[in-house]
Image (cartoon, grey):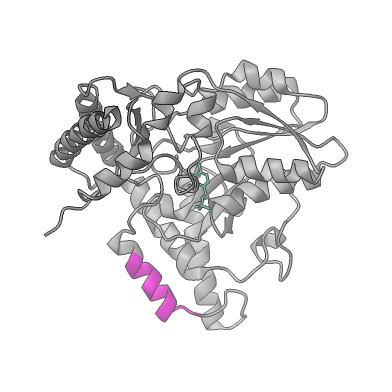
Amino acid sequence: MARSIYLDNAATTPVAGEVAVVVQEAMLGTFGNPSSPHTMGLEAERLVGEAREILARALGSKNHEVYFTSGGTEADNLAIRGVLAAQVRKGRHVVASAVEHAAVLETLRHLARMELCEYTLVPPDGKGIVAPEAVARALRADTVLVSVMLVNNEVGTVQPIPEIVRRVKEQDPRVVCHTDAVQALGNVPCRVEELGVDLLSMSGHKLGGPKGVGSLFCREGTRLISQITGGGQEEGLRSGTENVPGIAGFGRAVALAMENMEARTAKLRQLQRHLLSRLETIPDSHIHGDPLSNAPHIINVGFPGVRGEVLVHALASEGVYVSTGSACSSKKAIHSHVLETMGVPRAVLEGSIRISLGADNTLEEMNIVAELIGQAVMELRRYQRQ
Ligand SMILES: Cc1ncc(COP(=O)(O)O)c(C=O)c1O
């Protein structure tokens, strides 16, 4: 059988078999509309309610603080646009980190172009970490929202969210704090009391759930204006008939991730450490971020003298699937804004790839991948020099 080693789990994860069964059962058996008053509607409503409870348990929140969306992108949009719309009296300034996902950065750029917001981006240090003091310094009297992600999708850096929120709230308790936890859920703890955030975005397909479903945690008392209006589903915050199969599958994926979190993250950390130790032996390799405190599933490594996208294709031809950066930008030949803002030199940045692990990967696969990367890098460097 042809080799297939999937190492692009930060782009999307395979759906767990158990999750697929739940989705299928919801599609075939529980197809009522959760808003319908009859038994079939109530059955569908029950599935949505169960999933809401599972997410709330994972976050340590109340059930009614969990709202379902069509994914992480919509959750980020709802957080940003919803706060700006609710806080017009206070102002329209947003502080975000410069390493956010496009779902945050492009939304801010778009709103700024329409003169609906102003924003300040806080750069990280060389390891990709955003300093709480720098975030606090960027606050203005008209700041309404701070948005800093929990785990960066390109390098895996875990941001000091509790400290950022503490500094922001000390300075101005009215500022709403949002974190994009799309890469964090299932990989690092996401308890909202410990994080202190008011809003937190999640996505189903990054932890073994279906695509096209996500959620926004919105702390009780945080004012948000809905961005999709209609039938008033999700307590009026997000109209539209619920994606019942997707939501049920998302719930099951979160339940599975929470059940196995300790064992899964320990296994990921072991794979990550092993692969890092092998990658470090490749001449002139540059590991980005701070591997020891990174999320356990992401490695970002640069090889000057090689083009990242060429390396990705060379590995794919050997049945090994990695990426150059975030899934949204890796098909376009643009450079990683994350590595750029971390101050990574051009030659290293252009030769960087992201390897994102899943708990089903094995140590044996790590050995094969390290070997193949080493060979490909040598060959491509030789070819480049000719
Ligand atoms: C950090 C982060 N935020 C948001 C998203 C968008 O999530 P979705 O694909 O569910 O819209 C992603 C997906 O790549 C992500 O990694």
List the single residue furthest toward the front.
Answer: 386
Magenta stretch contains residue 38: no
Q: Residue at x 43, y 76 (%)?
A: 27
Q: Residue at x 50, y 23 (%)?
A: 342
Q: Which residues are magenta?
A: 20-31
* Nearer the observer, 133 or 113: 113
Q: Is residue 151 above or below residue 37?
A: above
The picture places residue 325, in percent across and down from the top left corner, at 43, 39
* Nearer the observer, 108 or 184: 108
* Overall secondary structure of the magenta section: helix
* Nearer the observer, 10 or 79: 10
- Report the quarter where the N terminus lies: bottom left
Whether residue 356 is visible here, answered yes or no, is no
The picture places residue 181, in percent across and down from the top left corner, at 51, 41
Q: Residue at x 64, y 62 (%)?
A: 234
Left or right: 3 as drawn, with respect to 348: left
Q: Residue at x 34, y 46 (%)?
A: 8
Left or right: 8 as drawn, with respect to 241: left
